[in-house]
Amino acid sequence: MAVGLIVDTDPGVDDAFALAVAAHSAELDLRAVTTVFGNVDLPTTTDNAGRVLGLLGRRDVPIGRGAGRPLIHPTTRRAVDVHGDDGLGGTAEAFGPVGDGPAGRAIDVATRVLETADEPVVLAAIGPLTNVALLLATRPDLADRIDRLVVMGGALGEGGNITMGAEFNVWSDPEAARRVLVEERVPTTLVPLDLTHAVTVDEPWLDALGRSGPVGAALAGTRAPYLAHYGRRLGAPRIAIHDAVALLEAAVPGTLATTPLALEVDTSLGPARGTVLADRRPDADPGAHRVDVALPAGTGLDAVREALFHRLTGDRAG
């Protein structure tokens, strides 16, 4: 039986890829999408969620409009240099109209799904963790209704993409990230840059995706600013589709090799703000909460690329 899924997202090029993986995975029953500020502002992430769901033929999925800023310290920095001004590589209109708009607040939409589900639900959080922190703070009784959190965020040995140590999603709201990754006790898998930068795809891969049909064409069409950014970072014409990797793990647990680690998130206002620290000491506190962190060692990277391609092209058996 398919597992119920809520996706909390800030579309975002790789978020669009991730929503396609969610919609095309027979193991998952996509029951809600909640939006948060992040790659672009909240109105744009919400519009983009509607556009992508429409292209995927999933306008039945309710959208909840979430936080437009972090919990405590405001930030106006967005990732338009990576995702384009419209969040979808300058091609948002190619995904179609925005749809009917939000069905309500993110917390209310997520609460309805969790309260009415027959079995615990997977929550995939692929943007800043503000909505998730608010949900767990205001409705702690619902924590047991979450089967697993799958979070895309953080960077351990890889180094950050927004500062020397911080990855964008965690850096955007470190206080929320600390609440979710350190203080809560919901079973959690963290998919950091260490892994997602190892699962990059090249232009021939994107060309083949573009030839697969309307969804693949729209996704591949977002590539221009992404290729420019990652070409500079990686030194090759490849892109990282971070959030799609996290959704593949949500669909098929164990796809990514994980190591349970106790984490800390730097919430200071200094240069390390937003950095995720992992305690790798063999004598680390045995009572500390541990998160399953996905790392490249032990993960079949080529198999991940192949599985992503099949699901993005609509081959639900992939």
Image (cartoon, rainbow, N blue to C red):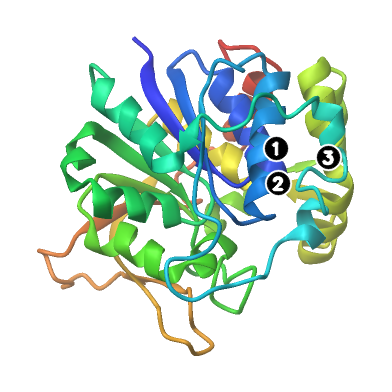
Question: What's the distance in space between the residues labelled 2 and 1, CA to CA?
Answer: 6 Å
Residue bearing the label numbered 1? 48
The structure residue drawn at horizontal position 49% and vertical position 90%, both measured from the top left corner, is 270
Work out which residue is located at the far left of the displayed protein and give it: 287
Name the residue carrying label 2. Answer: 44
Q: Report the disc number at residue 104.
A: none
- Residue lying furthest bottom in this view? 270
Q: Is residue 95 left or right of residue 314?
A: right
> Whole-percent x and y of residue 171?
53, 69
Give the CA distance from mark 2 to mark 3: 16 Å
Nearer-the-camera pick, 112 or 276: 112
What is the x, y in percent for residue 135?
32, 48
Q: Secondary structure at mark 1?
A: helix
- x 62%, y 51%: residue: 42
* Secondary structure type for disc 3: loop
For badge 1, the amino acid type reads: Asn
